[in-house]
Image (spheres, helix red, strand yellow):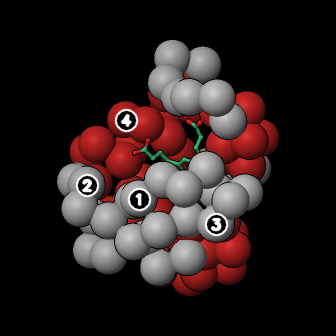
Amino acid sequence: VDGAELYKTRCAKCHRDGTESSKAGGGVVLKGQSAEEIEMKLNGYLEGSYGGAKKKTMARVLKKFSPEELKAMAAHICTL
Ligand code: HEM
């Protein structure tokens, strides 16, 4: 699984290069977080235990990925 490719095609539309997010991306910054932190947040969105006002957007996006793909994306995001 190529986390960089998944990020580019499925996440960058909203999260751009990770230093900022579009309005649809809620303005959050992904850069500077560890893979563990990111993975915890991704799983939290899926379980409903993490997130802010726009957490439903992320839960909807993340439903389409396998645990392996989520891990690969988290591993890529911590290199941004
Ligand atoms: C938040 C990752 C795709 C919109 C987040 C956060 C992460 C993340 C880790 C939490 C940031 C933090 O609280 O520190 C990803 C990944 C994606 C993806 C890995 C690709 C699979 C998208 C897309 C959109 C989007 C396509 C827009 C349609 C948002 C919004 C938030 C957010 C609105 C803030 C949600 C809230 O209120 O908690 N994303 N994202 N994301 N993302 Fe994404």
**Does the closest atom of ligand 1 sit within 8 Å of the Cβ of label 3?**
yes
Res. 73 mark: none
Residue type pointed to by label 4:
Met
Q: CA distance from mark 2 to mark 3?
A: 18 Å
Mark 2 secondary-structure assignment: loop
* Among numbered discs 2 and 3, the one appearing first in the sequence: 3
For residue 29, the mark is: 1
Q: Are marks 3 and 4 in contact (CB under 8 Å)?
A: no
Quadrant in the picture for residue 58: top right
- At x 60%, y 19%, the residue is 48
Q: Which label sits on residue 40?
A: 4
Q: Which residue is mark 3?
A: 22
**Mark 1 C-beta closer than 8 Å to ligand 1:** yes
**Inter-mark Cα distance, 2 to 4:** 11 Å
Which residue is pictured at 51% across the width and 17% down the height? 49
Q: Residue 15, position in %: x, y?
A: 56, 67
